[in-house]
Image (cartoon, coloured by chain):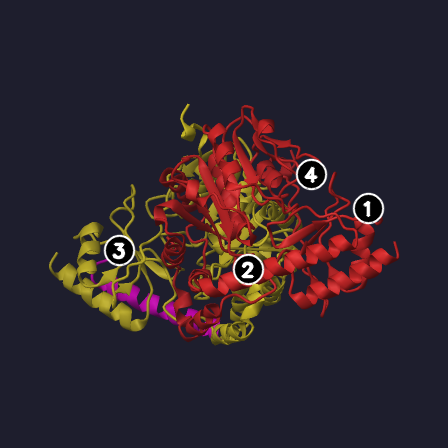
Chain colours: A red, B yellow
Amino acid sequence: MALSDNFRKVTPYVPGEQPKIRNIIKLNTNENPYPPAPGVQKALADLKDDFAELRKYPAPNCDLLEEAIGKYYGISRENLFVGVGSDDVLSMAFLTFFGSDKPVLFPDITYSFYDVWAEVYRIPYKQIPLDENFEIHAEDYRMENGGIVIANPNAPTGVAKSRDWMEAFLKEHRDTVVIVDEAYVDFGGESCLSLIDQFDNLLVVQTFSKSRALAGLRIGMAFGCKELIRYLKDVKFSVNSYTMNMPSLLLGAASIEDDAYFRSRVDQIIATRERVKLQLKSLGFEIPDSKTNFLFVSHPKKHAEEIFAALREEGIIVRHFKKPRIDNYLRISIGTDEEMDRLVNAMAKIIQNA
Amino acid sequence: MALSDNFRKVTPYVPGEQPKIRNIIKLNTNENPYPPAPGVQKALADLKDDFAELRKYPAPNCDLLEEAIGKYYGISRENLFVGVGSDDVLSMAFLTFFGSDKPVLFPDITYSFYDVWAEVYRIPYKQIPLDENFEIHAEDYRMENGGIVIANPNAPTGVAKSRDWMEAFLKEHRDTVVIVDEAYVDFGGESCLSLIDQFDNLLVVQTFSKSRALAGLRIGMAFGCKELIRYLKDVKFSVNSYTMNMPSLLLGAASIEDDAYFRSRVDQIIATRERVKLQLKSLGFEIPDSKTNFLFVSHPKKHAEEIFAALREEGIIVRHFKKPRIDNYLRISIGTDEEMDRLVNAMAKIIQNA
């Protein structure tokens, strides 16, 4: 018998590249183009002065950060779980809640980590096709299942469902846990957070990585009823007592306190998105309405892969997924206005030659 | 059927308390009493200046940190894995390597997270009793197994095996992965790092939390042959692409570069430990030889639980495990000389009254 016979063998998720080329315009990982809240810099100054504190373990219950998030959203800490980015939160949720032998359901086109988590934890799953407009239809989910995961807004399409739609959907699915992954919700989507009291099987997942410009810190969170959160915390404390390090706790708490800064940056990104969408549409691009910080674009006259390569020549990196049904699309993160002007100009040139 | 029927239900590990009382002497979580290397403060100053960088994802391959660790230990990055503390590394290793239906073996008295990971990942395990002097005997491990975990030095006993003993042990166990958990090795133990070329089933795990005084940052690492590390990285990238945040990568790299500082602090802790051991022994305490930053102590005239309570009255917190065979012991972390003087004085008073 070979040593590796009992090893867990998986095909991992491949994150968007982090190129080291200078002066490149990086529109491929949905990062926020603006800095985090100024309070984060102040918190770093304090941590620098108190750096000897790093010798101690961080608070395992993440007190400071949980209190700040709880206060911001007006919810109790019993309804709140934090993790190392929403990936950590989602991974723990898959491990905790999806123990049925019936398949977990999620769309065929969605965040491409869901099937990876299902594989690594050996959870059966079934991918339900979106329609040709990338829309989810509730009737397609009417089957026995071990849980459901809906990214809302969806990625990489940017398409969102309303809270009313989600509420009706949740009313149909009360017997297994429904995860609503709201990584992009702050850019114009409608959150299901207000529904957690009504549905004891609803877990809402959000992140600091996009709207709060803190991808480098790795902070994600889940909201749910007391019982769901308790099970999730038990599993977390069975995997790693101290997932959140001291900088995450301090800087994360400082970041969420500054709501005015947050709203002004989010509004700016939405305004840029809508302006760029019109400009790209006038170049002939087809783009579903986006409630995220990215656009999902396709052009009838030039294949996405060719556009991807041509943009790269111009020093602009976007995301192309070599996957069925979406391989003729590009996902373009919303950068600063200057960056997006350069993108639109490059696209005009590329399409002119098509 | 209840919603929770398919949930993963576990009894989590309980970390040592982080009391918020001021002026307390905290000798309960094996934290380093000295600050991290001064370079860490400099790295925090740089991060403060560049705080806008936090909007970006950290390097998923942890380049800066892996390069610094690899350089320090003279090993290739192909032989190195980093995680969110050694708990994250060990948890991933359990998930990756222990897929057999035969039991994973570890001592009955050891780091109390091993059985928790086995439970959460549903791995069969068997606890092999240490002898009455807390020693491991190689012959007790001669049985079919799905893997072996040895903490060396062991926790919470502090007792260490030599590298020669470990090498002979490894020669007997070539068919399953053997994890050697060296969380405390820098305080006088002998590392198995030099054996990873010789044994393709050996995974050596270490941490920045104790000897490098960075418990607050959460950095752990594993060393092993190329193949083991590749499997481990595949699983990691199937759980969370970006486990290590930007502060961890930057500050961790800065910390490991300062070897002179590291050695002087470790030497100081060892000197304090040996001095305190003699003082406590002269008070009648029984203490196995420790190669760690803690002492595991018992007194024939007073029960550990009573001593624990009496120390707490004096503002000194140590660790007591309510577990079979060790409930009459206390684990005392090595603090500064001043802290340990207060401990020894308190102990003298407590024992005098016994």
Q: Residues within 10 Å of mark 2 (few under 14, many from 20)?
A: many
Q: Chain of mark 1?
A: A
Q: Which residue is mark 2?
A: A266
Q: Residues within 10 Å of mark 3 (few under 14, many from 20)?
A: some
Q: Residue at position x 28%, y 69% from top?
A: B339
Compared to B262, does B139 lie above or below? above
Amino acid carrying label 3: it is Glu
Helix, strand or loop status at disc 2: helix
Q: Residue at position x 35%, y 58% from top?
A: B29
Q: Disc number at residue A300? A: 1
Q: Which residue is mark 4?
A: A133
Q: Chain of mark 3?
A: B
Q: Residues within 10 Å of mark 1 (few under 14, many from 20)?
A: few
- Check the picture and name the quadrant holding the C terminus of chain B: bottom left
> Alpha carbon of mark 4 to alpha carbon of mark 2: how far?
26 Å
> Alpha carbon of mark 3 to alpha carbon of mark 4: how far?
74 Å
Amino acid carrying label 1: it is Pro
Dot 3 and dot 4 within a common chain: no
Amino acid carrying label 2: it is Val
Q: Could you tell whether A323 is left or right of B238 in the image?
A: right
> In the depicted view, which residue is nearer to us: B172 or B326?
B326
Residue B66 horizontal/vertical position (percent): 60, 61
Residue A74 horizontal/vertical position (percent): 37, 52
Amino acid carrying label 4: it is Asn
Compared to A80, does A128 lie above or below? above
Q: Which residue is mark 3?
A: B286
Residue B75 horizontal/vertical position (percent): 63, 61
Asked if the residues shown at circle 3 and circle 4 are in contact, with their CB atoms under 8 angstroms apart, the answer is no
Residue A94 horizontal/vertical position (percent): 51, 38
* The magenta segment: B261-286
> In the depicted view, which residue is nearer to us: B50 or B29?
B50
Q: Chain of mark 2?
A: A
